[in-house]
Amino acid sequence: MKSLDERLKIVEKHVNDNKVTIMIIGLGSVGTYLLDYLVSMNNPAINIVVMGRNQEKMQSDVNIVKVAGLIREVNKSKISIESGVDLEDIPSIEKTIIKYNPNFIVNSSRAYPGLKYGSISWNNIRAYGIWTPLSIKFTKNIMEACDNADTNAIVINTSYSDAVIPWLKSAGKAYPDFGSGNLNHLIPRMRFAVANKLGIDDFWNVSFNFAAGHFHDVCISKEGQTEGVTLPLKVYYNGEEQDIPADEIFEECSISMPVDQKRNMMNASSNFRIISAIISAITTGENQQIFSPGVFGNIGGYPVIVGYKNENISAWIDESVFSFDEMN
């Protein structure tokens, strides 16, 4: 595969030519929510390909998204269905990638569809790592197909990215560029907490420099604490640093959330934000900040900037406040 910057350059051309193709692999709850969010962009330049095993289920899910979108009058994207693709069969994945030549590939596949791994493990042994082998199962095959096809796509992984992506990298395998997941879900909770502490309503003007590994960002989200570990955190409101104890912020992050598939609204939103940040950076020329677990094959989650360096589109870990070594 080409370097990330080379592939971003190709995406830039397609965005400027108003022809962007997004492939969603696995149309479970994450993929279906993501499909809905992409349709809601109401952009005829965006073509969406959904790829999976079950034609009947995918067609049904696509139909409801298309009808719901048209009710809202936001259904201008073309949606294609590629069924019968066996994620155990690398050549069949490769063939589909070559056929559609996507600009973005989002892997939302699951070894066991419909099973929320964490809903089992956390209550029993308070751990997530045991599920990593299941999460890497299809990701490895998809990335091998991407490598064989020499895809120009930006690849986003959905499940346990800060373990799965570095595991593939450490084995010398092709690996996704970005991960979505728990770190993405924690940042909004932190924004709400800071807004509450400051007594403000415009929580969207709260920003952070922050990094955390999977275990600790889940501890914060579920229990409001970090096991006594000090994490790299700076808090800003309208660009001005705020002096709020981290423990007070984290304590307010433990908020009631569903444990069923509705939780996947957050993961789908994380995928959507990575795609929209790249497109926005290209169309506006302004740097976009995202938070991504496993980004560039690193263990843990980091703040990332997508924007322009020396007039070329790029993406890099934000070290303007904390160095990579400090965060790592």
Image (cartoon, rainbow, N blue to C red):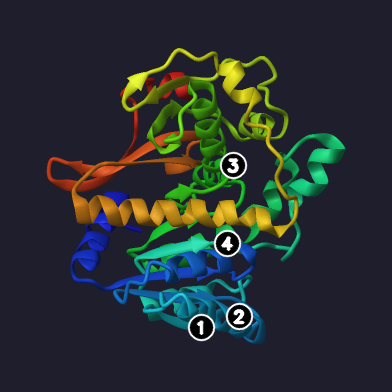
Image position, residue 267 (x, y; %): 57, 53
- Name the residue at 53% across, 61% down: 107
Q: Amino acid at mark 3?
A: Asn
Q: Earlier along the polypeptide chain: callout 2 or callout 4?
A: 2
In terms of secondary structure, where does tag 1 sit? Answer: strand
- Name the residue at 36% across, 79% down: 76
Which residue is under mark 3?
182
Task: Report if the CB atoms under discs 2 and 1 are less than 8 Å apart.
Answer: yes
Crowd rating for badge 2 (residues with CA inside 10 Å; few <14, some 14–19, many 20+): many
Which residue is under mark 2?
58
- Measure the C-alpha gap from mark 2 to mark 4: 14 Å
From this view, report whether residue 166 is shown above or below residue 14.
above
Task: Report if the CB atoms under discs 3 and 4 are less than 8 Å apart.
Answer: no
Q: Earlier along the polypeptide chain: callout 4 or callout 1?
A: 1
Residue extending furthest left?
Answer: 311
Query: Which residue is at the front of the view, 89 or 235?
Result: 235
Q: Amino acid at mark 2?
A: Met
Image position, residue 234 (x, y; %): 43, 20
Crowd rating for badge 1 (residues with CA inside 10 Å; few <14, some 14–19, many 20+): some
Crowd rating for badge 3 (residues with CA inside 10 Å; few <14, some 14–19, many 20+): many
Image position, residue 289 (x, y; %): 35, 40
Task: Report if the CB atoms under discs 1 and 3 are less than 8 Å apart.
Answer: no
From this view, report whether residue 199 is shown above or below residue 128.
above
In terms of secondary structure, where does tag 3 sit? Answer: helix
Which residue is under mark 1?
81
